[in-house]
Amino acid sequence: MFIKIATDLCDPKRIEKVLKRHGKKFIARILTPEEQEYLEYGLNQKGVKPSISHRVAARYAAKEAVAKALGTGIGKEISFQDILILKYKNSSAPYIKLVNNAAKLATDLGLTKWDISISHEKEMSVAVVIGYTENN
């Protein structure tokens, strides 16, 4: 089994400042239309609705972590739009969907399965991802 693990942190206050300056333009750069549907998603496990800046920060961190697991950063080889962080229907659990260059790079590396964990705190959003192959 081949495994790649990566993590990333993002400060929601930093995202809040960017959102005040660039608003929907920034969100459209970071999130696909499909992902934007989840910005107003329901309550977290503690019964609290995280702010938009927390939700964007978490997805930003998740995408950065996936890019790290792929051995590249966001930019030249893959974009934020190549990595989708979605939620399973009837669940708050996130999953990773790769498209375009990110999907090709994952295939080239042999990473066929992905797991993700996202968490929020007042001062920080964090994401941990694992990309792996399954031996049958």
Image (cartoon, rainbow, N blue to C red):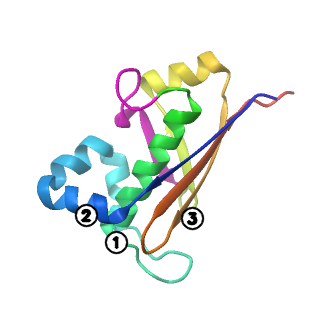
Magenta stretch holds residue 103: no
Position of 134 with respect to 38 (left or right) is right
Q: Which residue is mark 1?
A: 51
Looking at the image, residue 54 lies above or below residue 96: below
Instruction: Identify the residue at horizontal 45%, vertical 50% (top origin).
Output: 61
Q: Position of residue 57 (x, y in %)?
A: 38, 57
- Image quarter in which the C terminus is found: top right
Q: Which residue type does callout 2 highlight?
A: Glu
**Three-letter amino acid code at disc 1?**
Ser
Residue at x 54% of width, y 82% of height: 46
Direction from residue 23 to residue 129 in the image, left or right: right
The Cα atoms of the two marked residues, 2 and 3, are separated by 26 Å
Foreground pick, 88 / 79: 79
User: Which mark is drawn over residue 91?
Assistant: 3
**Which residue has dot 2 on it?**
16
- Describe the element under mark 3 as helix, strand or loop: loop
